[in-house]
Each structure stands twice: as structure tokens, then as C-alpha cells.
Image (cartoon, rainbow, N blue to C red):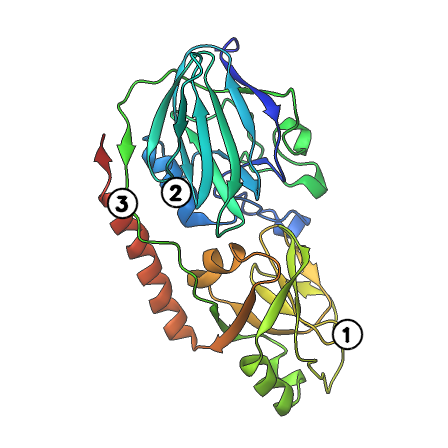
Amino acid sequence: MKNKFFEVLRAGISTTYQDAGRFGLQHLGVAPSGCMDLKSFKIANCLVGNNLNEGVIEFAYQGPLLKLNSGKIKVAIGGNVHFEITTSKNKKIKGECNRSYTLDSGDQIDVVATKKSVYGYLAVEGGFDLKSFHNSISTLTRAGIGPNDGKKINIKDKIYYKKDCTNQNNLIEMPSYSEKNIIRVLKGPQYDFFSEDSQKKFFSTLYRITNLTDRMGMRLEGEFLKNNVSTNIRSEGITKGAIQVPADGFPIILLTDHPTIGGYPKIANVISADYDLLVQKKPSMSISFKLVEISQAELAFQSYEKEIDKALSKIKKV
């Protein structure tokens, strides 16, 4: 199959290979990495008949322009994305997310841009032919871990896939993309470090997402949060979604490629059910926080999983 591949004509922005993540290595300083938006990732895989954790191509804002060298492959785009397919006979097809398409030799798929979101996912039937590291093909660029020597996908790269297309195309009817801006959180381990007034401000402020945002973290602008104890703590383990407040008093939300330890106080932690919603917010957009209890977070995550299962169960042949 090494003669069957996509040629990268344009790499796009922050285009990498990702799957569900690489777990069990945080004690060695290796973040789990993996897809940013789990729901969109799973939908893309489902549309091409893959295991839901199969590796895909993740992109931000603008995706790649790929040309199929030879063979026949089924592809799908997950997320809220504008893309086009140009056949070898120069016929243009306006792509629709949440359905699959069959590409033939010489066809091109142009992932032009995300719409009301940041991240999108390109899956192919059978998956990409990649070497895994600790049971994952996820790319952690700052550590040089993953396929392509741990680097982003580049122009003129060859992207090999495992098998030719065998199944017919699929469609999933999805609700419109959520524009909700309220992010639910749990109290962080240093919540009580902050003054009562700052605690109130944290939940009443509309924070603006700054341009200092990537797969590692999201820096916010808004009300200054006063720390009454210490702006530095002994470094301790960090989870995805932790909200740190450094000495400047403005929150930083740690995302999928977060460091494994950190020494800033954490006022809160984003609940898992709202993580996909959070990471799809673009810079200059605003968010606010709502405090919930652990029991509410658990119920929310159960609802989130049921929502994904319900969407995947509605797949149709086209």
C-alpha cells in the first residue's frame, strides 16, 4: 500500500495526526495529547466505518489541500468546516460535514476553513498507515512525539492510508453547532486562595479569549483576580481543563497538550462535558463560568456521552 497516498499540496494551520490520546505517561512528563474535540473526532471516524478511536488528521482554522495519488478512498470531515472536492475531471463538489465521500485517483479535497469553530477532523476508511508510540499516533509537537517525527504535517508530505474504499457512503444528521458561551467548572484545589470578591468576579465576568491560545492553553482577559495566599505553589500534577491564575491575575485554561505539572494556583477546572464546547471557541469570543458540584458534572458527562451515542446511532447510507 506504500504506493497509495495523499500528496500534501497545502498543509494548513496546525495540521497534525491525532487519536483519542496517549495515556499513562504523565508521570514521565508526557501529556496525553490527542484530539481537541472528542465528539467531532468520533463522528468523523463513524462516518467512514472506523473504530471510533482511529487516528485522523486534525487541523485548526484552515485545513490541508490533499491530492489522492492512486486508489480509491472514503473520507469524511468532522466539525463545522467549509471544504470542497475537485475530481480528476475538474468537477467541483461542495462538501458537507457529517457525511462521507468517495475519492478516486487524482481527486483533491480542499479543507478551506473552519466556520464557527477552531478545529476540524479528516478521517479515511481504515485509517492512516502510521507507526504508533505507546499505543497512540497522537502528535505532541513540543516534545517531538508521534508520527512525522512529532512534527506538524508539511507541504509535499505523503500521507499513506491502510486500504482502498470498500463501503458505501454515510450521513449523520447533526443539530446546529452550539454557540453557548457558559462553561461549567468545578472548584480548583486552590479556590480558597482567592478573595471572596475575586471568587464572585470569576463567576460574574465575561472573559475574552485572547490570541495567546493553542493546543496547550487558552489565555483570558477580564477582571483581575486577587490571590490572598500565594501566586506560586509547589509544582503539582495538572489535568486538562485546569484554570490557573498566575501573578498577573488573569486566568489561563490548560488544554490538551498541557504541561504535566505546574506551580500556579488553580481556581477551577472545566468539566469534561463542556470541554469540546470550550476548545471550539475562537480568539476574541467571550465565555463565562458557572460553578457546579461533582455530582452535577458526572450527570453532565453521562448526558454528553448519551448525546454522542444518539448521534452515531442515526447514521444513514447515502
Q: In this view, which residue lies farthest toward the bottom?
A: 196
Proximity of marks 2 and 3: CB atoms separated by less than 8 Å: no
Q: Which residue is mark 2?
A: 42
Tell me if residue 291 comes above or below residue 150 in the rendering: below
Task: Tell which of 187 and 157 is nearer to you.
Answer: 157
Q: Which residue is mark 3?
A: 173
Q: Amino acid at mark 3?
A: Glu
Rendered location of residue 298, percent (x, y): 37, 67
Please indicate whether residue 274 sits to the left or right of residue 140 in the image.
left
Packing grade of label 2 (10 A; few <14, some 14-19, many >=20) is: many
Q: CA distance from mark 3 to mark 1?
A: 45 Å
Please indicate whether residue 22 sits to the left or right of residue 75 in the image.
right
Determine the image quadrant of residue 61: top right
Please indicate whether residue 113 sits to the left or right of residue 171 in the image.
right
Q: CA distance from mark 1 to mark 2?
A: 38 Å
Task: Tell which of 234 and 137 is nearer to you.
Answer: 137
Q: CA distance from mark 2 to mark 3?
A: 14 Å
User: Residue drawn at (65%, 47%), measured in percent from left and top?
Assistant: 30
Task: Tell which of 181 and 271 is nearer to you.
Answer: 181
Packing grade of label 3 (10 A; few <14, some 14-19, many >=20) is: few
User: Circle 3 sits in a helix, a strand or a loop, which is it?
Assistant: loop
Determine the image quadrant of residue 166: top left
User: Circle 2 sits in a helix, a strand or a loop, which is it?
Assistant: helix
Proximity of marks 1 and 2: CB atoms separated by less than 8 Å: no
Q: Which residue is mark 1?
A: 248
